[in-house]
Amino acid sequence: MTAQIISGNELAKKIREDIAKRAAALAEKGVVPGLAVILVGNDPASTVYVRNKENASVKNGIRSIMERYPEDFTEEALLERIRVLNEDPSVHGILVQLPLPKHIDTRKVIDAIAPEKDMDCFSVFNTGMLMIGEPRIKPCTPFGVMKMLESVNYPIRGARAVIVGASNIVGKPMSMLLLQAGATVTICNSKTRDLGFQTRQADILIAASGVRHIIKADMVKPGAVVIDVGIGRGEDGKLYGDVDFENVKEVAGYISPVPGGVGPMTITMLLSNAVDAAEKAQKASQQ
């Protein structure tokens, strides 16, 4: 039996309709959600991603503040721009596009963003809150994956979840959200022995290693939910993920595609975080 496809495109469309309604409700109260995105340098992938964020913001009632700077933009100047945005009440969310040029300390920059405006949930403060189970902001990609699981009413509580990839951006925060939802979680990395043994135990398999087609059909438990977070471009110009989609879909119960899976959900949850921050700021101003 072929797996049911979890379409990130379709789910993102539904969620964005709600986001637009929330943004409109705020606008009626005189508050327009403001999202500032800073891009330093000319990384092609980052440029495309930033453009997509800008377009999505505008379409859903969010004011997009785009700040683009050259490769040689100094760390001091970047920190000053963040300070100004932190103090601007019309800016509810700030995102610094990664990677940054090598001469800039990424950790220092991320932690300079006010916690309530840290849309990626990358700061030490926000990752700490996530760790203790009290997240004020949820990291965009893991948050999107949770929404995808929710969309098919998959029973997370008690399920065995295996995450392939232990990054600070996806793997680690993903494990925290799944733990909080009641799953038993295993995180695999490049040193994991017999990766297939681990993945075959998974009711929920999250592939986020960045290695093309690392997940084969014989590594998947029949009926499992397989979410592919990885994305890359082959020599033929086509996009591919961590999962051998064509073969794995014949084993899994549910599967997300690449493209059209997690990618649209990441941007959608960024928009959701921005509107949520604006709603909190609006309530705080009335107290």
Image (spheres, rainbow, N blue to C red):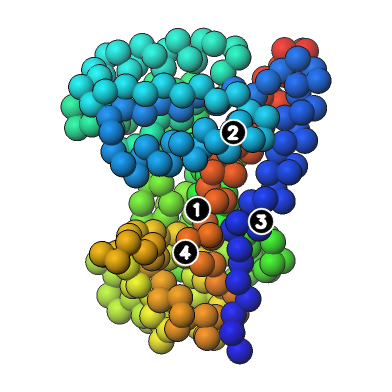
Q: Nearer the viewer, residue 147 or 29?
A: 29
State the mark number for residue 57. Answer: 2
Mark 2 or mark 1: name the one nearer the start of the chain.
Answer: 2
Disc 4 secondary structure class: loop
Q: Quadrant of the N terminus?
A: bottom right
Q: CA distance from mark 3 to mark 2?
A: 17 Å
Q: CA distance from mark 1 to mark 4?
A: 8 Å
Disc 2 secondary structure class: helix
Q: Quadrant of the C terminus?
A: top right
Which residue in the protein does label 1 denote?
263
Q: Is residue 177 above or below residue 105?
A: below
Q: Nearer the viewer, residue 225 or 176?
A: 225
Disc 3 secondary structure class: helix
Amino acid at the residue labelled 2: Ser
Q: Residues within 10 Å of mark 2 (few under 14, many from 20)?
A: many
Q: CA distance from mark 2 to mark 1?
A: 15 Å
State the mark number for residue 11. Answer: 3
Amino acid at the residue labelled 1: Gly
Which residue in the protein does label 4 denote?
258
Where is residue 87 shown, x and y percent of the image?
51, 10
Q: Residue at x 38, y 80 (%)?
A: 216
Q: CA distance from mark 4 to mark 2?
A: 23 Å
Amino acid at the residue labelled 3: Leu
Where is residue 76 shown, x and y percent of the image?
27, 14
Assess whether mark 4 and mark 1 are in contact (beta carbons under 8 angstroms): yes
